[in-house]
Amino acid sequence: MKRTNTCNELTSADAGKEVSLIGWVQSVRDHGGILFVDLRDRDGITQAVFHPESKAVYEKAQRLKDESVIQVFGKVVLREEGTNNSALKTGEIEVNCSDMTIHNICDVLPFPLEDERADKVNEDLRLQYRYLDLRRPRNINLLRTRHKAASSIREYLNSKEFIEVETPILFKSTPEGAREFLVPSRTNAGMFYALNQSPQQYKQMLMVSGIERYYQMAKCFRDEDLRADRQPEFTQIDIELSFIDREDMYALIENMLKKVWKDVLNVDISTPFLRMHYEEAMNRFGVDKPDMRFDMELVDLTDVFKNSQFKVFASIANGGGVIKAVNAKGLSDITQGELKALEDTAKTLGAKGLAFIKAENGAWKSPILKFLSEDEQKALREKLSIEDGDIVFFAATKWEQACAILGRVRLDCAKLLQARGKLDIPANLFKFLWVIEFPLMLFDEEQGRYVSAHHPFTAPVPEDAQYLDSEPLRVRGQHYDIVLNGTELGGGSIRIHQPELQEKVFKDVLKIPADVVQSRFGYMLRAFKYGAPPHGGIALGFDRLVTILTGRPSIRDIIAFPKTQKGQDLMAQSPSAVTEKQLKDLHIALDMPQE
Ligand code: ASP
């Protein structure tokens, strides 16, 4: 069945050759009794021609339907004067077919496969026929780009003497992180594995084993509610090294990303990346993963309102809270609907409302204007550079919450400004930065205890470790996040490798009961007593990285067989019911909710 060429190879230099091509029928056109078939494989398109004089093959060709699979045999000829197609690499020639094998006649397609029309087709239908949707050249190329990025990463890490090691997917349940997928063990009745959320503990054990430099394109699983950029299973570029500090890690990852951007996009990104402290990122952008492709920074106004007659703001400013604002420049033409949507989003983040001031035709309009003194108005005008055409939004509450609310308002306003053509974010602008100096612990109000900002294996900054007992919130972690265009590409940390310190973090700071520490992490604490090297690592979300590299709107576009937001594979129809016998073997009885 061998072909002589792909469908993207033949040029005028091949005229006269006898060739054979295999591919899919992209289209059949009848021009005055002659049939023209655009034959497509994953590389490109070649025009195959069937003349009525070659009767047998011509009659066969009349049966062809779009997307059928055929092999053609024939001679390469130059196209007639004036019929060259400069859009195709093979546009100067066509193959004059003398014979053809039909491998498969395609049924009526469930949707058209040309990009423009297919893109408008309901995504569920496309996911049900994912193999057809993937067959579109653009989508095959997305997988090709994904492959290129993975190859580039592997080349880089291999050149730096890393060893790729596979770690188990069947791990054990460690419920303090994200929700896990459980897998019942038939051979250990009543016991469960958990699919690994990340190879975190295994990769640390590999460091104790003396591997020194590990990486893995690791499949990870988290049973979380799915948002646009999440999948229940995803791929991480998982890395761990011994004998390094944070600076080594920054250089390693910067150079890796530099190579990937060069190899995949032929874009030179400049290094070193900007570094920003967590607190500064929150204060200026309202998030720990700032999108720095545009300004619109948050401004702190707490001092302005300390002595204000505006009691709501004054009491928050004096009661340990903050007053912050953001000026969405040029967005005073915001519609009622858009304003309402912004307010609704702010409310989901705990805001009671969303105070604003609009500057239009030389005057300010605002429900809170009557509460603001001349001096306060002046201070606002200066600090926020308010001009005609602007709209300013306020948040007055606890620091984290005020940051979160305005951080979100900032992003939503940027989208509104983009839609109006008032903010231009070029597609090839890549703003990388490291966010560093995170607190080691956060206080979880709901649970009434400290929780790890990253994970419990992160080492404290050495000079802060003394405050672990007295003031845990003052302790900074040796944790770093790599951020690109407002997306957290990845994160990691220098780890704790001293068993005493690790045990202290589990028991005294995180208040995990001793027996739970023992059953969950006992093996790790033991391992650290047998010559554990200092080590650290990072994991980068590979799917997210490829989504950004390809400029696609959804992570599903760059995954061969993605799941829907309900976690379903619509093509294979999973998850699915299982038989009584299977459940019985696993000692599982179903207790379904009443309809
Ligand atoms: N395992 C961590 C994660 O998945 C990353 C790391 O610390 O290496 O987020």
Image (cartoon, rainbow, N blue to C red):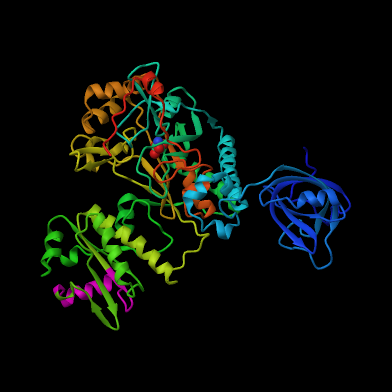
Q: Is residue 559 left or right of residue 394?
A: right
Q: Position of residue 431 (x, y in %)?
A: 46, 56
Q: Which residue is depicted at the point 32% across and 67% down?
A: 338
Residue 295 seen in the figure: no
Residue 279's place in the image compared with 363, above or below, is above
Residue 501 seen in the figure: yes
Q: Is residue 372 magenta?
A: yes
Give the position of the N terminus as an image quadrant: top right
Q: Position of residue 49 (x, y in %)?
A: 80, 55
Q: Nearer the viewer, residue 316 or 561?
A: 561
Q: Which residues are magenta?
A: 371-392
Q: Position of residue 248 (x, y in %)?
A: 46, 40
Q: Is residue 501 magenta?
A: no
Q: Name the quadrant containing residue 242.
A: top left
Q: Name the quadrant containing residue 101.
A: top right
Q: Is residue 448 left or right of residue 173?
A: left
Residue 472's place in the image compared with 506, above or below, is below
Q: Is residue 26 left or right of residue 540?
A: right
Q: Nearer the viewer, residue 255 or 37?
A: 37
Q: Nearer the viewer, residue 247 or 402?
A: 402
Give the position of the C terminus as an image quadrant: top left
